Amino acid sequence: MIEAGWNSGEYQKILTHESQLEKIIDEKCIRGVHFSGKRDLGKLIATKAGRKLIKSVIKLEGSGSFAVLPDADISEAVKAAIKSITLNSGQDCYSPKMFLISS
């Protein structure tokens, strides 16, 4: 992180039990939240972050899908599919994990 230009302690990943989430978000030093997971917890985190007026990114359950319809240019669809699954090394919730191809 420091090599990328971040100051020490500026970003931290916290793995915790859901019972601790509200307490963590309420801490004065917390200035943003990025969450991936269950809908109920996402709702709780979004509510707490909104009340505190801090930045938040909430990604909820599920996997992205990539649909190729019969009238698609297959060559372009393949290029787009490869780009979408390799963007950010595939480490995004919205990267497609299911391909639907209609002929």
Image (cartoon, rainbow, N blue to C red):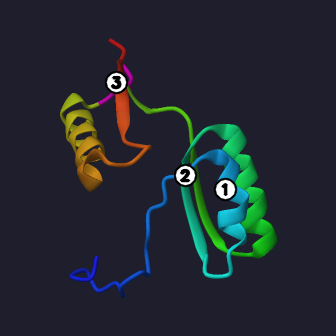
Kindly report the secondary structure that dominates the magenta region of the rendered protein: loop
- Residue at image position (27%, 52%) is 87
Residue in front for this viewpoint, 6 or 60 = 6
How many residues crowd mark 1 within 10 Å: few (<14), some (14–19), many (20+)? some
| Circle nearer the N terminus (3, 2) | 2
- Residue at image position (73%, 70%) is 26
Residue 11 - label: none
Q: Which amino acid lies under the numbered mark 2 shown in the image of this protein? A: Thr
- Residue at image position (58%, 65%) is 33
Q: Is residue 1 above or below residue 47?
A: below
- Residue to which mark 1 is pinned: 21
- Left or right: residue 24 versus residue 85 is right
Q: Position of residue 102 (x, y in %)?
A: 36, 14
Q: Which amino acid lies under the numbered mark 1 shown in the image of this protein? A: Leu
How many residues crowd mark 2 within 10 Å: few (<14), some (14–19), many (20+)? few
Residue in front for this viewpoint, 36 or 24 = 24
- Residue to which mark 2 is pinned: 16
Residue in front for this viewpoint, 89 or 41 = 41
Label 3 and label 1: CA atoms lie apart by 35 Å
Residue 99 - label: 3
Q: Are marks 3 and 2 in contact (CB under 8 Å)?
A: no
**What residue span does the magenta drawing correspond to?**
68-72
Q: Which amino acid lies under the numbered mark 3 shown in the image of this protein? A: Phe
Q: Is residue 71 above or below residue 20?
A: above
- Left or right: residue 18 versus residue 87 is right
Q: Is residue 86 above or below residue 101?
A: below
User: Between tags 3 and 2, which lies in front?
Assistant: 2
The image quarter in which residue 6 lies: bottom left
- Residue at image position (27%, 37%) is 81
